[in-house]
Amino acid sequence: MAIKQFTEEEARQRKNARQREYAKKTGYASQQNYIKNNTKAYTFRFTYSKDEDIINKLEITENKLGYIKALIRKDMEENG
């Protein structure tokens, strides 16, 4: 019995369909809904030439989000 070969586009479509079905079965869609309704994302860009010290600190920090949150909370306590 020969194995059916798919074009790259057909394979991509089949993969996307499997992923959508998996998302429905596992509740991933509800997780995305939770993220949409209960979280806020911020993005920052740093310049290598001007912010190298910050980049290096963040690179060696394992929990970047926790580190940044702690700094902000400490500042809020000190400055209101």
Image (cartoon, rainbow, N blue to C red):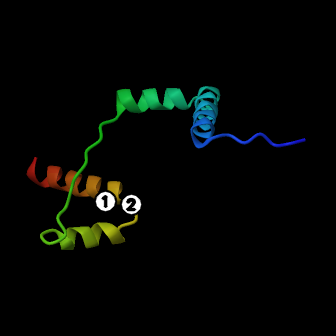
Q: Residue 62: x percent and y percent?
A: 40, 65
Tell me the SS state at disc 1: helix
Dot 1 and dot 2 residues touching (CB under 8 Å): yes
- Splitting the image into 4 quarters, where does residue 70 fall? bottom left
- Dot 1: within a 10 Å radius of its alpha carbon, few (fewer than 14), some, or many (20 or more) residues? few
Amino acid bearing label 2: Asn
The quadrant of the image that shows the N terminus is: top right
Disc 2 is placed on an element classified as loop
| Residue 67, numbered label | 1
Provide residue 13's location: percent of width, then percent of height.
Answer: 58, 33
Q: What is the spatial separation of the Cα atoms under label 1 and label 2, in whole angstroms?
A: 6 Å
Residue at 34% across, 55% down: 66
From the top left corner, tell me how far across and down residue 44 is, in percent: 22, 52
Label of residue 43 in the image: none
Q: Is residue 4 left or right of residue 28?
A: right
At 34% from the left and 35% from the top, the residue drawn is 39
Q: Is residue 22 left or right of residue 70?
A: right
The residue under label 2 is: 63
- The residue at the point 35 percent across, 67 percent down is 61
Give the amino acid type for the residue marked by disc 1 in the picture.
Tyr
